[in-house]
Image (cartoon, grey):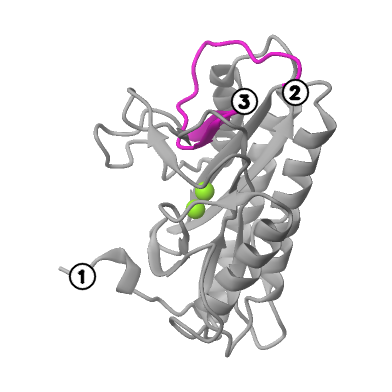
Amino acid sequence: MISWERSINIKSRQELEVMREAGRINAEALAAAVALVAPGVTTAEMNEAFEAVQRKYGVTSPFKNYPGPYPYPASICTSVNDELVHGIPNKHKLAEGDIVSIDCGTTYEGFVGDMAVTVPVGQIEPETQRLLDVTRKALEIAISKTVPGNTVGDVGYAVQTYVEEQGFYITRTYTGHGVGRKMHEGPQVPNYGKPGRGMRLREGMTIALEPMVLVGTGETIVKPDEWTVASADGSLTAHFENTVAVTADGPVILTAL
Ligand code: MG
Ligand code: MG
């Protein structure tokens, strides 16, 4: 059996149109969850808001029952403050000054859109806002490098260089990935790398680019729930993600409203 990192699937123009709709619905459902974010709201309520939009379209989340230490129990991941990715929605109330990342997916007509944003809860510290700004900019940089002929090393190098210049850290343990009929396909797209190294990007590849940025160190731990990944030192983290198509006309964001 080959691992997902090696299973590259080139999409036709028609398949890209289906993926664009999967991504659009996903972005709409994500917006409903983000609209709730405020002090006193729970991440379980955000998950419900996301699922309500998915029900309206008759679509589902590839996150639900995703294989792991036990089947993933929700349709989105909600990761608060030091939590980087894979946080499970729960009844804990968000507080003023928190940041919460929402990572989510939608399967529509057999294709997946995968996207994440990190948003402030009420007023946040200026340095926390800078973390969000740097991570969002890192995603924009990654997207700009996602063109035919570049390698995954070119993408990772650009992200790593920018994030480290800003005084923050990237994780080496979790990466971006190809996405299509499955949420995780090849190639693996790390947020670090060397120019010219790794697999070459080709027209029709669809990639989930997802810079994951940490304030204190690049080290992560997994919390006792066996899903939630957090910074090892308890420092803040942020995560932004879009699904992007590699095309002759340049990168096309498939997870746009
Ligand atoms: Mg994701
Ligand atoms: Mg992803």
How packed mark 2 is, by other alpha carbons closer than 10 Å (few <14, some 14-19, many 20 or more), is many
Q: Residues within 10 Å of mark 1 (few under 14, many from 20)?
A: few
86 in magenta: yes
Residue furthest left as drawn: 1
Is the residue indicated by label 2 positioned so its CB lies within 8 Å of ligand 1?
no
Q: Residues within 10 Å of mark 3 (few under 14, many from 20)?
A: some
Q: Is residue 80 left or right of residue 177?
A: right
- Say which amino acid is labelled 3: Ala
Q: Which residue is mark 2?
A: 121
- Between circles 2 and 3, the one closer to the viewer is 2
Alpha carbon distance from label 1 to label 2: 42 Å
* Residue placed most toward the observer, 140 or 207: 140
The structure residue drawn at horizontal position 20% and vertical position 70%, both measured from the top left corner, is: 2
Element assignment for label 3: helix
Q: Quadrant of residue 34?
A: top right
Indicate the secondary structure of the residue bearing disc 1: loop
Give coordinates of residue 1: x percent, y percent.
15, 68
Q: Is residue 144 above or below residue 150?
A: above
139 relative to 103, above or below? below
**Where is mark 3, residue-wise?**
49
Q: Amino acid at mark 1?
A: Ile
Q: Amino acid at mark 2?
A: Val
Q: Which residue is mark 1?
A: 2
Q: Nearer the viewer, residue 58 or 33?
A: 33
Sequence order check, earlier mark of 2 and 3 = 3
Residue 191, percent across and down?
54, 62
Return the x and y of residue 126 as percentages of the image width and height.
84, 33
What stretch of residues is rendered in magenta? 75-97
Looking at the image, which is closer to me, 197 or 246? 197
Residue 147 in view of the camera? yes
